Image: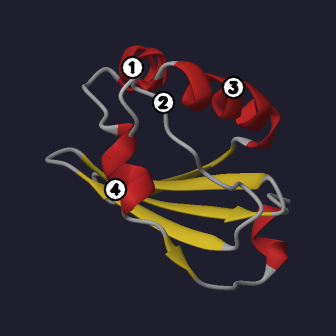
C-alpha cells in the first residue's frame, strides 16, 4: 500500500488467494482477469464469479483501497481486509475450467 492508500495488483495471475475469519473460509482464483471466489460458510460451499467487477476493483485499488473494503464489508456483513487477501496470493497455475460454473 502506498502513502495515498492505493495498491497495485496484476489480475492476469495466475494466483490462488485465501481468506479466513471466524465465519467463512474463502479460496480466490485469479487468471487472465477472471476471478472466482469459492466461499465455505458453515460447511456449505458457494462459488461467485467476480470477473465483471475486476475493472472496478482495479480502479479502486489505484485510488482508494478503503472504498473496496467498505463495499465488501457491506456485502459480506463483516469487516474485510482486502490487503490481507491480496497479500495471501501465491503465484500458482490452475485449470481455467474452474471459471465454468455449469
Name the residue carrying label 4.
19
| Residue drawn at (56%, 20%) of the image | 63
Q: Earlier in the sequence, mark 3 or mark 2?
A: 2
**Crowdedness near tag 3: few (<14), some (14–19) or many (≥20) residues, C-alpha within 10 Å:** some
Q: Earlier in the sequence, mark 1 or mark 2?
A: 2
In depth, the one of 6 and 79 nearer the eye is 6
Asked where in the image residue 75 lies, by quadrant, the reply is: top left
| Residue drawn at (80%, 53%) of the image | 33
Name the residue carrying label 1.
66
Q: In the image, is residue 61 above or below residue 68?
A: below
Residue 6: which numbered mark, if any?
2
Task: Provide residue 6's location: percent of width, then percent of height.
Answer: 48, 30
| Residue drawn at (68%, 34%) of the image | 58
Task: Provide residue 32's location: percent of width, then percent of height.
Answer: 84, 62
Name the residue carrying label 3.
59
Provide the secondary structure element on which disc 4 rests: strand
Estimate the spatial distance between the alpha carbons at disc 3 and disc 2, rounded to whole Å: 10 Å
Amino acid at each position: 500500500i502506498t502513502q495515498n492508500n492505493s495498491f497495485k495488483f496484476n489480475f492476469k495471475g495466475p494466483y490462488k488467494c485465501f481468506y479466513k475469519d471466524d465465519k467463512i473460509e474463502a479460496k480466490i482464483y485469479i487468471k487472465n482477469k477472471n476471478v472466482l471466489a469459492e466461499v465455505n460458510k458453515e460447511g456449505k460451499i458457494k462459488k461467485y464469479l467476480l470477473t465483471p467487477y475486476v475493472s472496478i476493483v482495479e480502479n479502486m485499488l489505484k485510488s482508494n483501497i478503503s472504498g473496496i473494503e467498505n463495499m465488501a464489508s457491506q456485502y459480506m456483513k463483516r469487516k474485510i481486509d482486502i490487503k490481507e487477501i491480496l497479500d495471501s496470493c501465491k503465484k500458482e497455475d490452475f485449470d481455467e475450467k474452474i471459471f465454468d460454473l455449469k
